[in-house]
């Protein structure tokens, strides 16, 4: 009888230790090992060799329908098409690189993501304005990193 109780105690201890180990591994997998401020979303450091070889930015008759309910949605795609090579060199702070596999802000405009995400739209409007003001992609990237695009009012575009 004592031997049976001893085995139950050993089994309970092993289960407790195993449970603690699983908890520690799970908690460790959720731990933040880097500084989020240092984590820059995906972008390309230089312009593409051939912009025409990239997937097209939506344009023309594709800028209609339920995804384009507001004037700014059409306008941002029109502007994105004009600065395609610049957008290729910019990150997108909505983290669509992780969630959708985007490789730059340009990727948001190859499909409908740019219509549904205010971060992407604000960044593209900001990039267009800064490009027209003579800023380089590196300078625009610096502005995006400082969240300067958050000043953009989508309803005014």
Image (tube, rainbow, N blue to C red):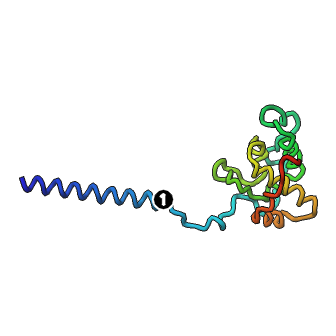
Location of residue 7 (image quadrant): bottom left
- Image point 51% across, 62% down: which residue? 31
Location of residue 87 (image quadrant): bottom right
Residue 88, given in percent of the width and then of the height, sits at 79, 55
Q: Can residue 115 be seen by looking at this rendering?
A: yes
Residue 52, given in percent of the width and then of the height, sits at 85, 48
Report the front residue among 136 and 142: 142
Residue 11, given in percent of the width and then of the height, sits at 21, 54
Q: Identify the residue at the far right of this view.
A: 133
Report the front residue among 71 and 38: 71
> Which residue is the site of mark 1?
29
Residue 125, given in percent of the width and then of the height, sits at 85, 53
Q: Identify the residue at the far left of this view.
A: 1
Q: Residues within 10 Å of mark 1 (few under 14, many from 20)?
A: few
User: With 82 as the anchor, is 34 left or right in this view?
Assistant: left
- Image point 89% across, 65% down: which residue? 135
């Amino acid at each position: 009888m004592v031997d049976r109780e001893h085995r139950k105690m050993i089994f309970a201890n092993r289960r407790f230790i195993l449970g603690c180990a699983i908890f520690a591994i799970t908690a460790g997998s959720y731990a933040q090992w880097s500084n989020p401020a240092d984590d820059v979303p995906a972008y390309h450091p230089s312009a593409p060799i051939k912009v025409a070889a990239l997937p097209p930015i939506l344009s023309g008759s594709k800028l209609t329908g339920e995804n384009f309910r507001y004037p700014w949605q059409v306008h941002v795609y029109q502007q994105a098409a004009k600065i395609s090579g610049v957008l290729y060199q910019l990150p997108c702070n909505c983290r669509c690189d992780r969630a959708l596999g985007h490789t730059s802000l340009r990727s948001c405009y190859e499909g409908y993501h740019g219509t549904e995400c205010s971060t992407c739209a604000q960044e593209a409007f900001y990039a267009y304005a800064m490009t027209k003001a003579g800023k380089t992609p590196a300078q625009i990237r610096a502005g995006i990193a400082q969240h300067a695009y958050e000043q953009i009012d989508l309803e005014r575009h």
